[in-house]
Amino acid sequence: MRGDVRAAVLVLLEESPRNGYQIIQELAERSNGAWRPSPGSVYPILQQLEDEGLVEIASTESGKTFHLTTKGKTLVETERDALGKPWEAAAAEVSDATSDLYGTLRQVAMAVRQVGVAGSDAQTKKAVTILADARKSIYRLLAEDES
């Protein structure tokens, strides 16, 4: 799913300063997982907005935080209707079933991460087998005849 990254970044930064990772995470969350722009699309937009004088960068302990300049705030205020909420369009294009699928995938990813962090080698190997079986089952599902 693709959306208007520029508009989304401007609207999110109007709400509060954020770093690039937080922008990506917020868009994924607001679109119920339907839209997760890549760093390769977010960071060039942030650079462009900085070049246009709409965004400033503040260095923090956790990295760079972006915030709107006065010029950026004015732009968002005057173009609010045109900017809209791009994440809503992405979310609207995804069915409830697909949204549930993405939600479950996020839960599985968190569980896998936990096994990677806290699991023994035996548990990790078993998790790999479980995931490989799940991957094969999902591909078989796609090969089934729906009629």
Image (cartoon, helix red, strand yellow):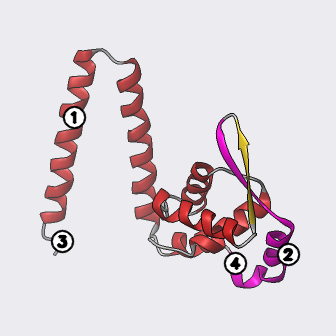
Q: From the image, tell me which residue sits under label 3.
A: 146
Q: Is residue 38 visible?
A: no
Residue at the (15%, 49%) spot, across then down: 136
Badge 1 element? helix
* Badge 3 density bin: few <14, some 14–19, many ≥20, Cα 10 Å: few
Query: Residue 18, position in %: x, y?
Result: 69, 51
Specify the amino acid type for callout 3: Glu
Q: From the image, tell me which residue sits under label 2.
A: 74
* Badge 1 density bin: few <14, some 14–19, many ≥20, Cα 10 Å: few
Compared with 74, 100 (above or below) is above
Query: Residue 6, position in %: x, y?
Result: 62, 72
Q: Nearer the viewer, residue 10 or 69?
A: 69
How many circles with numbers are drawn on the protein? Answer: 4
Q: Nearer the viewer, residue 75 or 131?
A: 75
User: What's drawn in magenta, residue-wise?
Assistant: 62-84
Specify the amino acid type for callout 4: Gly
